[in-house]
Image: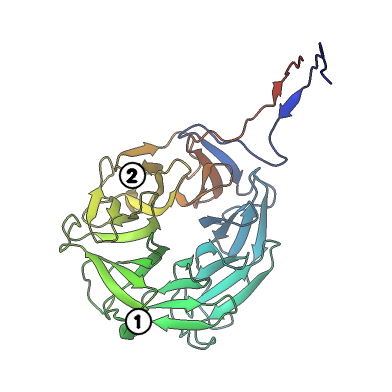
Amino acid sequence: MAIVGLVASLSLVAALAPGAVAADPLGEITTAATGGTTPGFTVDSLPAAIAAGPDGNLWFLERGSTPRVARITPDGTVTEFAVPPPDQGDDPLSLADITAGPDGAMWFTNFNPPGSVFRVTTDGTVSLAVKGGVTAGFPSGNVEDIVTGPDGNLWVTRPFQNPADELARITPAGVVTTFGGVAGLPTDATLRSLTVGPDGNLYITDSGQGGGADVEGRVWRFNLSSNTFELVARAGTTPGFTAGNEGGDITSGPDGNLWFLSSGTSSGITRLTTAGAVTEFTDGVSTNAYLRYVTVGCDDGLWFTQTVEDGSDPMIWRAGTDGALTSYTQGLPPTNPSPEGIAAGPDDNLWFTSRLDPGGVSTIGAGCGGPPTTPIVLTPTFTG
């Protein structure tokens, strides 16, 4: 049956889901939380590494006098969780890196000897998963970077080991297997940051400080099929990789390449293909710039932080996959800004920590748009 002359005025409202936060314009920096001001956020907590969690929140490490792991929601609510203190005789905790694990929890590392790996569930339950000199197959030493591998395990770098560095695989149940000299890693290696590459293998930067003498910086591939190290690039030898430079934080880019922060002879960001072709980008970056962490934004840009260490100026950088660099400083926290960790958030913003007292967490927009900040009302008219 045809209905003629029916007119309806329906208001269809599209709004933000509860708790959602709209993405900010490109380069707009906003303070989300400040130590000593935001409830639950301790002053002088020295927030450092940060990562997105499976619960839609950001998780970050605090390296202050009382080390903690903390959760911040997209609306800026902070909750801190105590980390079990070291046993008598252990060095003080120095929390290093954090990642989302394969089991729905967050995993993070403690750099100082004997070296350890912790696990925190999304409800804030913290437990010691692995400890150097206690866990079978995990000797006492340092633990730095951590990443979840495509094999469903955690992988960590162990720099400054004695007698030699190693890479360690940790199952979600805490079973450890280490890979070093037998897997082809030289004794002068100093493994720092690692990431999963576009080919499904691990890529690791090597600052070359081990073995009692400095050597040129390198990047290694750890082949997960053969469990062996393969040299991908070496400073001063690989074309485009400047002698005296070394790699820092590394990530897999949206263009099918690896991208890592570099310093030494010059500072900047470096593109590395899986075949070992190197291109350095340093335009506008001061030689003494202290670059810390890099991540990929929703805009397919490489976003990285510059701290105030070594006389460096605080700022946030964006690199396009063509290497074009843009810096951002307006809107940084007014007191002691020193950007440290950075991660892509669930709201299409980048979230970064500011480590110095009072400590803080801020966002910077990647210009991706995101959901609307105000309701959109549509009033369709039906006739027939």
- In the image, taking residue 330 as reference, residue 67 lies left or right, namely right
Res. 264 mark: none
Q: Residue 246, located in which quarter of the rendered image?
A: bottom left
The C terminus lies in which quarter of the figure? top right
Describe residue 129's horizontal placement relative to residue 19 as left or right: left
The residue to which callout 1 is attached is 180
Residue type pointed to by label 1: Gly
Q: Which residue is mark 2?
A: 321
320 vs 224: above or below: above
Residue sitting at 61 percent across and 68 percent down? 103
Q: How is the image coloured?
A: rainbow
Q: Is residue 284 above or below residue 96?
A: above
Q: Secondary structure at mark 1?
A: loop
Q: Nearer the viewer, mark 1 or mark 2?
A: 2
Work out whether residue 2 or residue 65 is closer to the camera in this orientation and state it.
2
Q: Residue at x 31, y 84 (%)?
A: 181
- Residue 350 % position (x, y): 50, 44
Relative depth, front residue between 285 and 1? 1
Identify the mark nearer the N-term, 1 or 2: 1
Q: Is residue 85 visible?
A: no
Q: CA distance from mark 1 to mark 2?
A: 33 Å
Q: Residues within 10 Å of mark 2 (few under 14, many from 20)?
A: some
| Quarter occupied by residue 44 | bottom right
- Residue 4 location, x and y as percent? 81, 13
Estimate the x, y position of residue 353 in percent, counting from the top left. 51, 50
Residue 45 locus on image (x, y percent):
57, 57
Crowd class of label 1 (few under 14; some 14 to 19; many from 20; radius 10 Å):
some
Mark 2 lies on a secondary structure that is: loop
Q: In the image, what residue type sits under mark 2?
A: Thr
Q: Would residue 329 be visible to someone looking at this image?
A: yes
